[in-house]
Amino acid sequence: MFIDRVLSGMRPTGALHIGHFHGALKNWVKLQDEHPCFFFVADWHALTTHYESPEVLEDSVWDMLVDWFAAGIDPQKATVFIQSRVPEHAELFLLLAMATPLGWLERVPTYKDQIEKLKERDLSTYGFLGYPLMQAADILIYRANMVPVGEDQVPHIEMTREIARRFNHLFGSEPGFEEKANAAVRKLGAKRAKLYKELRAKYQEHGEQDALDAARALLAEAQSLSMGDRERLFGYLEGARRVILTEPAALLTEVPRLPGLDGQKMSKSGGNAVLMREEPKVLAQKIRTMPTDPARVRRTDPGDPEKCPVWQLHLVYSNDDTRAWVQKGCRSAGIGCLECKQPVIDAMVREQEPWRNRAQPYLDDPSLLRSIVADGCDRARAAAQETMRDVREAMGLAYS
Ligand code: TRP
Ligand code: SF4
């Protein structure tokens, strides 16, 4: 089964900051024009670490969704939904759990780190250990082939691939598979059948990825195949098994280094964030009070942009001319820091204007947001149920 589908999720953290935009949302907005996309609010994931404060969940979910649409996520193009509204995620999570070795979860690099880092919370829970497996279920249930994530999430995608491989290995066998596959090959017609066999051999004997891609393209175009045969032939390419769950690839998001107001990584809890929809006055105040190169004690002291977090913002927000003006003015004490910050403030306010405009209808009419998301949940659920039919059948649960 080969589907072109992007999937990504975000934990609900309430109103988003510009780091979320430049680190993830901007990329999602681009992807929705290039592929069918599914984007979801990972509300169960939030509970794996914040199970003691469920009261903040609901507002956080809606506030975050407003910012997704403000950023330009278009519900006409992408399917936007909430994880817990598609309970099939939990069913797949449960079924995958049956055959997932404990060691795979204990070895996830973030596991011990996070327990150390979030010491004030008790994370020695079953839910927290299992959350990468829940993430695997989130991805596999849509048979997504691409998952845009940041670097920190790559080990989770790797584990998801292993989970899919193991599942197909354990549950992808079908009585008489080889014979059925061979019969399906013949249905391709002589010319295509020959090409298919050659490409399959190249992939299986020499691991040629190009051959696998070409064979998949051949199958995608073959009109004469039934759904079942097509699936069999996709599976047969990779072995003598059916491919029930698709191995996804991480789509590494290139993240510009956007510092927080104090030069550290921008985060809500760090208190150093600029929100996506910040009052222009508050925004200006936040930038004006940002620390700069400590060497510039007086206006007449020259500075070094490399030692100043404001420069990092110029790298995101300014053109070459402005950057040259900063470099020269800072090093020669020709400009003051407030002067230097103004173009950043102006560019940020300009950037936020369309976000504000797009958010307004949702703020005016919260039921609009509810109905768009309800529609997304329905669509996501239909896709999830399709996979679950095959999963249940493969695991012996398709009682008729
Ligand atoms: N774990 C991700 C994070 O903390 C969020 C997430 C949950 C996710 N499920 C996902 C991301 C599936 C991509 C695909 O950022
Ligand atoms: Fe930073 Fe600009 Fe001040 Fe130089 S002039 S220290 S780059 S704010």
Image (tube, helix red, strand yellow):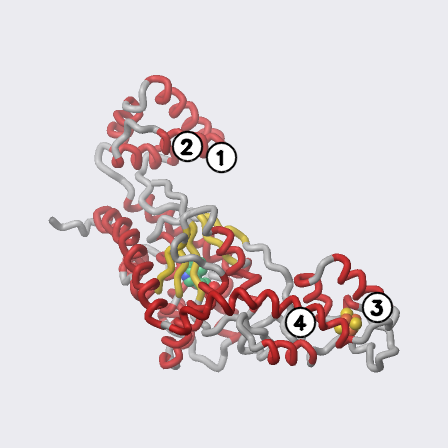
Tell me the crowding category of disc 4: few under 14, some 14 to 19, or many 20 or more residues within 10 angstroms, Cα based: many
User: Which badge, 2 or 3, is on the more N-terminal residue?
Assistant: 2
User: Which badge, 1 or 3, is on the more N-terminal residue?
Assistant: 1
Q: Is mark 3 within 8 Å of ligand 2?
A: yes
Question: On residue 329, which mark appears?
Answer: 3
For residue 396, side relative to residue 164 (left or right): left
Q: CB of mark 1 within 8 Å of CB of mark 3?
A: no
Q: Which residue is mark 2?
A: 217
Coordinates of residue 177 in the picture (x, y in percent): 26, 33
- Number of numbered discs: 4
The local secondary structure at tag 3 comes to helix
Q: Is residue 63 visible?
A: yes
Between marks 2 and 4 in the image, the one whose residue lies nearer the viewer = 4
Spatial CA span between label 2 and label 3: 56 Å
Spatial CA span between label 4 and label 3: 18 Å
Q: Which residue is mark 1?
A: 209
Residue at the far left: name it: 400
Spatial CA span between label 2 and label 1: 12 Å
Where ligand 2 lies, by quadrant? bottom right
Q: Is residue 163 above or below residue 352?
A: above
Between marks 2 and 3 in the image, the one whose residue lies nearer the viewer = 3
Tell me the crowding category of disc 2: few under 14, some 14 to 19, or many 20 or more residues within 10 angstroms, Cα based: few
Q: Is residue 103 visible?
A: no
Q: Which residue is mark 4?
A: 345
Q: Amino acid at mark 2?
A: Ala
Spatial CA span between label 1 and label 3: 52 Å
The local secondary structure at tag 2 comes to helix
Q: Amino acid at mark 4?
A: Ile
Question: On residue 87, which mark appears?
Answer: none
